[in-house]
């Protein structure tokens, strides 16, 4: 049998469960806005066998640019930069996982071609590799 106080307690607990959402929303709205012109500029850093091969600016990139990374043993990866996205459009590796990943454009995203040891990572110009999601990890 449900009593009056049971209903009151359930309603009270339900309302209180939304309290953290209200607190975090208020705290986020009080943060100062970023000054104009301080937006994060993104670059795609391409590494081959752990060494930086090329860096491509993604922020503000327009049009289409393609180039090939070719190894001495005949392995190759065709890289395509279109607008503000980058992808591996073709490769002669067996699994084709790097080609099937598609385009990337957000901070922290990567494409890896393990057989050819090619890594493409989207970073900020300040060297950040992961988005700032507000999580604080105590040391």
Image (spheres, grey):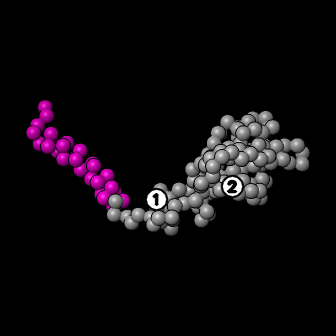
Q: Nearer the viewer, residue 6 or 78?
A: 78
Dot in front, 1 or 2: 2
Up-down relation of residue 4 to residue 17 (above or below): above
Q: Nearer the viewer, residue 111 or 126?
A: 126
Which numbered tag is attached to residue 56? 2
**Disc 1 to disc 2, C-alpha distance:** 29 Å
Which numbered tag is attached to residue 135? 1
Main SS, magenta region, reads helix
Which numbered tag is attached to residue 69? none
Q: In the rendered structure, which disc, 1 or 2, sits on the residue that comes first in sequence?
A: 2
Q: Which residues are magenta?
A: 1-28
Q: Residue at x 31, y 58 (%)?
A: 26
Decide if residue 69 is in sight here: yes
Answer with left or right where residue 8 lies relative to residue 73: left
Q: Are marks 1 and 2 in contact (CB under 8 Å)?
A: no
The outermost residue toward the top is: 1
Q: Residue at x 37, y 64 (%)?
A: 31
Q: Residue at x 89, y 45 (%)?
A: 73
* Residue 69 spot, x, y in % from top left: 80, 48
Up-down relation of residue 75 to residue 126 (above or below): above
* Residue 91 spot, x, y in % from top left: 78, 39
């Amino acid at each position: 049998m449900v009593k009056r106080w049971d209903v009151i307690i359930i309603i009270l607990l339900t309302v209180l469960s939304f309290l953290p959402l209200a607190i975090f929303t208020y705290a986020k709205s009080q943060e100062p806005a970023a000054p104009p012109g301080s937006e994060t500029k993104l670059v795609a850093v391409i590494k081959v066998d752990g060494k930086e091969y090329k860096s491509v600016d993604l922020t503000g990139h327009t049009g289409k640019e393609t180039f090939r990374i070719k190894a001495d043993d005949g392995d190759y990866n065709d890289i395509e930069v279109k607008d503000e996205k980058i992808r591996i459009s073709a490769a002669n590796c067996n699994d084709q996982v790097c080609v099937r990943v598609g385009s990337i454009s957000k901070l922290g995203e990567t494409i890896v071609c393990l057989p050819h040891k090619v890594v493409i990572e989207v970073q900020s110009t300040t060297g950040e590799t992961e988005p700032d999601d507000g999580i604080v990890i105590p040391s």
